[in-house]
Image (cartoon, rainbow, N blue to C red):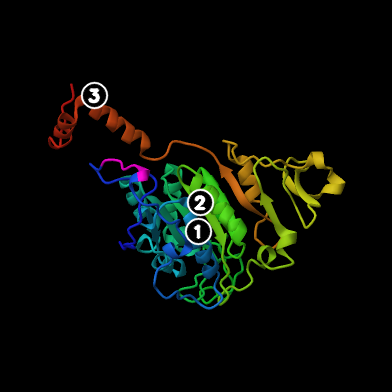
Amino acid sequence: MSGNGNGHVDGLGFGQPGEEAVSETAVPAVAPLTKADFSSDQETRWCPGCGDYAILASVQSFMPELGIPPDRIVFVTGIGCAGRFVYYMDTYGMHGIHGRAPALATGVATSRPDLSVWVVSGDGDALSIGGNHLIHALRRNVPLKILLFNNQIYGLTKGQYSPTSEEGKVTKSTPFGSQDHPFNPVSLALGAEATFVARTVDTDKAHMAETLRAAAAHRGAAFVEIYQNCNVFNDGAFDAVRAKGRRELNQIRLEHGKQVRFGPEGERGVARGEGGRLELVDVAEAGEDALLVHDAHRLEPSLAFELSHLAARPTGPTPIGVFRDVQRPVYGEELALELEETRASLGTEELDRLLHSGETWTVS
């Protein structure tokens, strides 16, 4: 694990054990955090033009908003192009083995609830060998912010198909076209009962900041899929929602409590068809009253799941934004409260003696 050593003062009240609180007037004012506080001195090395550069810049620019000093933030990555991310963040961090970032981060988050823990992973890393780690972190509602960089390809190992590559994808490992049906990462997260699920695009800095802001504010596991262009092995995969002149036509921006409509003038929208399924409509023909109103806080996830299936691939109108944002007990919090209550009733020394008494306990 690496750290930044910047020595920032913690503005969230996390002091060292045994320290007394210090009055704000008793210490000099601390300069506001900036992007530079989260940028390491390591040379950033991805392929020129890679979407990871845009994501890194957005995350580094956003981090000061949290008001959390870098020495209270941890980034955990797996293997792949996204794995380099941890070296470029001037925070604590860990570069884990393939697919295991959510498992490592779970250990950090549960043992140090005072830290802000972020996971960065690619579609191959998170959805192939790491698939089980991801879904269990989400269903348990571990307090992690998980950023999935989805470029629909294996980039670091030079262009093999990934769990999100489309059927028929011709790559070095599938010269006759992929026979696999791809994962929809947002649908997968919703199926795992994730309490926060969102999607954004690498080059849309404003939307990404808005999405990261919502994820950071969420209590529990927050999953954010980021469409990330690999200009070497899968260039243009997301042009429909990324390229100027096309993104204005195809980005369906989801906003809680607002009608789901899109297009340069909001002339298109989402409504329920005669069969009860969601469909894309022209607002002038369907009427504004027919348009779906997005409810990200709906506890039952079927609506969010339907929205995630509006576009099988990001080649046309595709929803981005927050699909689901609901509250559920955060993993480990209830146990921690029970232990504190037990300590209060038994006394610290008696409870410690019980916990360390051997392989069997006698409880009266």
Q: Amino acid at mark 2?
A: Phe
| Residue 7 place in picture, x, y as percent | 32, 58
| Residue 271 position (above or below residue 34) | above
Q: Residue 306 lies in magenta, yes or no?
A: no
**Magenta residues: mostly which secondary structure?**
loop
Is disc 3 placed on a helix, strand or loop? helix
Of callouts 2 and 3, the N-terminal one:
2
| Residue 259 place in picture, x, y as percent | 73, 43
Tell me if mark 1 has few (under 14), some (14-19) or many (20+) residues whose alpha carbon lies within 10 angstroms of its own. many
- Which residue does the image show at 82% across and 48% down from the upper left? 283
| Residue 105 position (above or below residue 295) | below
Q: Amino acid at mark 1?
A: Leu
Quarter of the figure with residue 121 = bottom left
Q: Is residue 302 visible?
A: yes
* Front disc: 2 or 3: 3
Query: For this rendering, which residue is in front, 353 or 277?
Result: 353
Tell me if mark 2 has few (under 14), some (14-19) or many (20+) residues whose alpha carbon lies within 10 angstroms of its own. many
Q: Which mark is residue 345?
A: 3
Is disc 1 placed on a helix, strand or loop? strand
**In the rendered image, which residue does mark 1 sit on?**
148
**In the rendered image, which residue does mark 2 sit on?**
223
Q: CA distance from mark 1 to mark 3?
A: 44 Å
Q: Is residue 25 left or right of residue 288?
A: left
Q: CA distance from mark 2 to mark 3?
A: 38 Å
Asked whether the residues under the numbered discs 2 and 1 touch, taking CB atoms below 8 Å apart as contact, a structural biologist would say: yes
| Residue 258 position (above or below residue 64) | above
Magenta stretch, residue numbers: 20-25
Location of the N terminus by quadrant is: bottom left
